[in-house]
Structure formats: structure tokens, C-alpha cells
Amino acid sequence: MAKVVLKVKGMHCASCSVLIDKLGLTVPGVLSIKTSYGAEKTAIEYDESKTTLEKIDEFINKLGYDIIRPDEAGAHSPEEEEAKDRERIAEAKRRMIASFVLSAPIIVYYMLIHMFNLPHVHSIWGLDLNYIYWILSTPIQFVIAWPFYRNSFTAIRVGSANMDVLVALGTSAAYFYSMIGFLFFNIDHPFWESSAALLSFILLGRYIEVLAKGRASAAIKELLKLEAKEAHIVRDGAEMTVPLD
């Protein structure tokens, strides 16, 4: 029987750790698995006669995540890991900004309509505004928010669900209802703002979360630098200094 604590990459919400814990136990030979989303680590206890760490890694990889095995731990330098963290933060920021740039006209318009009980402006200079809102919301739904769909497909493929499935299902329902109703049933109020605003604010939350995790990780690394590098021990009655390892 072996016990290991390993780094996990690719988790994007707390339900990811629950998914890994739940489905990880279905791997023959895995006795227990406990994953921490905040620490990005998983503690695995398994029977070496029934399974291997490589098989567990392969299964978790199918879920859309990756564990860093001991033989892979030195594959990337701290500088490379920090560069990857910065790229994740930058990508989250780009998606959030792009989403709000496109959704802002829709959000502001419907906020003013509902807050001040104003009549709907259906067209400007003969152009139906709903077409503009449809054009603005489409790239948010299927390009900027594509990771929600990708992660949903991964979860559904293994017979489970996570927050991304809920987000993709809810926003898709609002989007397609609006599209079909607008094109074929002449509905007066398509729900373009529902899907666009929801995705924009969830992406904002994801960006803040990634940013906070990055800062926390940097703070922990700075604390680890303060760790003692040597230890004083007594062997055969004589005191000596040895590396802490």
C-alpha cells in the first residue's frame, strides 16, 4: 500500500476536487483520495499490487486534469511554473475583458429599461437592435466562454457533472430560446442579456479567483524561501551541520 500527495493541475472550481474524489475511487486499487482545490493537491492511498500511479494519472487525465507524479516533478523549473501561472491569469483577464466589451451595451440597455421602466427601443435608423444584441452575444457564448463547454463535455463523458455543465446548460437555454423565439415567433424581449451578462460576471469571478490564487501561491513561495537550508545534528557525540534534505 502506498500513500502520495501530488500536485493537481487544471482544476477551475471547487466541484472539480469533488469530481476527482468521487470518480478516483472507481479506479481499481485506489483506497482513498482527497483533493484540495485551494492547495491544488490530492492525497492518494492505493494498493500497489492492483494499480500504479501511472494508471491513476491516466484516469484523472481523462477527467480533464493532470497530476504531477514524482518522476515529473522536476520536469519544469519554478520559473516555467510561474510563467504558466502568469499566462493563466493573462488568459482569464483577456476573456473577461473581451466578454464585458461585447456585453456592456446589452447589459446597460436592459438595466436602464428595467430600472427606469422605459419603453423598449426596437430599432434605430431602421435597424432592429435585437440583431445587434444577437451578434454581440454570439461570440461571448461560443468563443469566449468555450472553456465552459469543453469542461462540460469532459465531465459528461465520464458520467458526472460540475459547475461548468450548469453554466453551459443555463446560458445555452437562454441563448437558443432567444434565437428561436426572435427568428420564428417574433418575441418582443429575447434574453440576450441573460446569457451575456451571466457569462461575463462568471468570467469576472474566475479571473478574480485565479488572480487571488496566484498571489497566494507567490506569498507561499516567498515564505518557503525563509525555510532553513541546514540542520544541526549530533552523531557519535559530535555536532555537525548537514543539508536539511
Image (cartoon, rainbow, N blue to C red):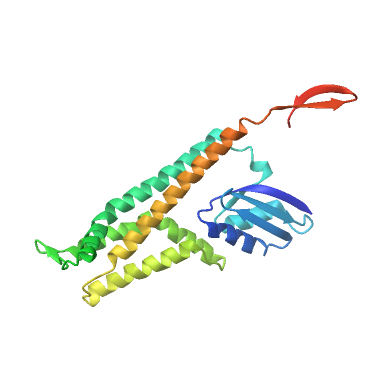
Instruction: Between residue 17 and residue 51, name the one nearer to us.
Output: 17
Q: In this view, does 210 lie to the left or right of 240?
A: left
Q: Position of residue 205 (x, y in %)?
A: 42, 53
Tell me which residue sits at (54%, 41%) in the image: 217
User: Which residue is the extreme one toward the right?
Assistant: 236
User: Which residue is the extreme one toward the bottom?
Assistant: 185
Residue 239 image-quadrant placement: top right
2 to 230, vertically: above or below: below
Q: Is residue 19 left or right of residue 206?
A: right
Q: In which quarter of the image is the N terminus?
A: bottom right
Residue 149 visible at all: yes
User: Which residue is the extreme one toward the front?
Assistant: 116
Q: How many marks?
A: 0
Residue 81 visible at all: no
Q: Position of residue 204 (x, y in %)?
A: 39, 52
121 to 76, vertically: above or below: below
Q: Is residue 25 left or right of residue 125?
A: right
Tell me which residue sits at (47%, 47%) in the image: 210
Residue 182 image-quadrant placement: bottom left
Instruction: Between residue 45 and residue 238, name the one nearer to us.
Output: 238
Q: Position of residue 221 (x, y in %)?
A: 57, 36
Q: Quadrant of the C terminus?
A: top right
Instruction: Between residue 62 and residue 195, name the one nearer to us.
Output: 195
Tell me which residue sits at (42%, 63%) in the image: 167
Q: Where is residue 122 in the image (x, y as percent from the top left)?
A: 15, 67
